[in-house]
Image (cartoon, rainbow, N blue to C red):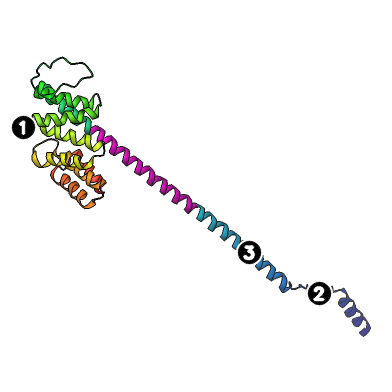
Amino acid sequence: MKRVVIVTALLCWGAQPLAAPAPVVEAAPSSARSGDINSRVDRLERQMQARNQSQLQLQQTLDQMQREIGELRGQSENQAYQIQQMLERQRQLYQDLAKLQSAPQAAAPAATPSSTPAVSSLSEADAYTQALNLATKERRFDDAIPAFRRFIEQYPDSSYTPNAYYWLGQLLYNQGQLAEAGTMFATVADKYPKSSKRSDSLLKQGLIADRQGDKATAQRFFKQVISEYSGSSAANMAQKHLN
């Protein structure tokens, strides 16, 4: 009986499966981990450099666009100013022509197309019309200048005299004779305070001073135009020059 118990115990013990050995995990070498970290750092540095390069290129592009926009804005303002001047000259011409049409006309003596009759042989209105046509229609500026001079000498008290001074100043200004042009514009501004050409004469005095490098005097004239003729085209142009 004792032998049977011992045999049974041995059989039960032999039937139990052997426990599996614990898995062995081999630790990664330290050199491998270091290499992986270095590769990641290199990759991040390359990404940072690429992003910085992209930002630099973008900033350069923006700077170039700003310069081009500034140039375009300057061109646009210059063109707008030229158009404004052209419209102003047309307005002045229409005013002069309307004033002439309302004045009584006298028959002018016959003359060849190439000749310029003396002012003394023409009426006041015809003499002024002739000088104005030489300047604006025929564009014979070299003939228009002496024609306006003769008119002013012949008719110093005419209602057209302020305009004659103005157009004479404008012709001289276009030819670069700034000093004498300034004298003509100053005559209109100082001697004829009610003239429709006074605001433009003050503006032209400012432009002449600006071209001569006298910025302080130019600003004084521009501010005077803005103060005395607020809202006019002359005041708008004066404001642009101040800006």
Q: Secondary structure at mark 2?
A: loop
Q: Residue at x 19, y 28 (%)?
A: 93
Dot 2 surroundings within 10 Å: few (below 14), some, or many (20 or more)? few
Majority secondary structure of magenta residues: helix
Residue 184, by quadrant, is top left
Q: Residue at x 69, y 68 (%)?
A: 35
Q: Position of residue 20 (x, y in %)?
A: 81, 73
Q: Position of residue 33 (x, y in %)?
A: 69, 70
> From what the image shows, is residue 14 above or below residue 184?
below
Q: Which residue is mark 3?
A: 42
Left-right relation of 232 to 191: right
Q: Nearer the viewer, residue 178 or 216?
A: 178
First in sequence, mark 1 or 3: give its number.
3
State the separation of the CA atoms marked 1 and 3.
91 Å
Q: Nearer the viewer, mark 3 or mark 2?
A: 3
> From what the image shows, is residue 238 above or below residue 104?
below
Q: Which residue is mark 2?
A: 21
Left-right relation of 72 to 41: left
Q: Magenta segment: does it hold 80?
A: yes
Furthest residue in direction top, as rendered? 110
Q: For the magenta stretch, what is the residue range?
A: 58-87
Residue 157, disc: 1
Q: Magenta segment: does it hold 127?
A: no
Q: Nearer the viewer, residue 29 or 10?
A: 29
Which three-letter amino acid code belongs to the residue tagged 1? Asp
Q: Nearer the viewer, mark 1 or mark 3?
A: 1
Residue 189, by quadrant, is top left
Which three-letter amino acid code belongs to the residue tagged 3? Asp
State the separation of the CA atoms marked 1 and 2.
130 Å
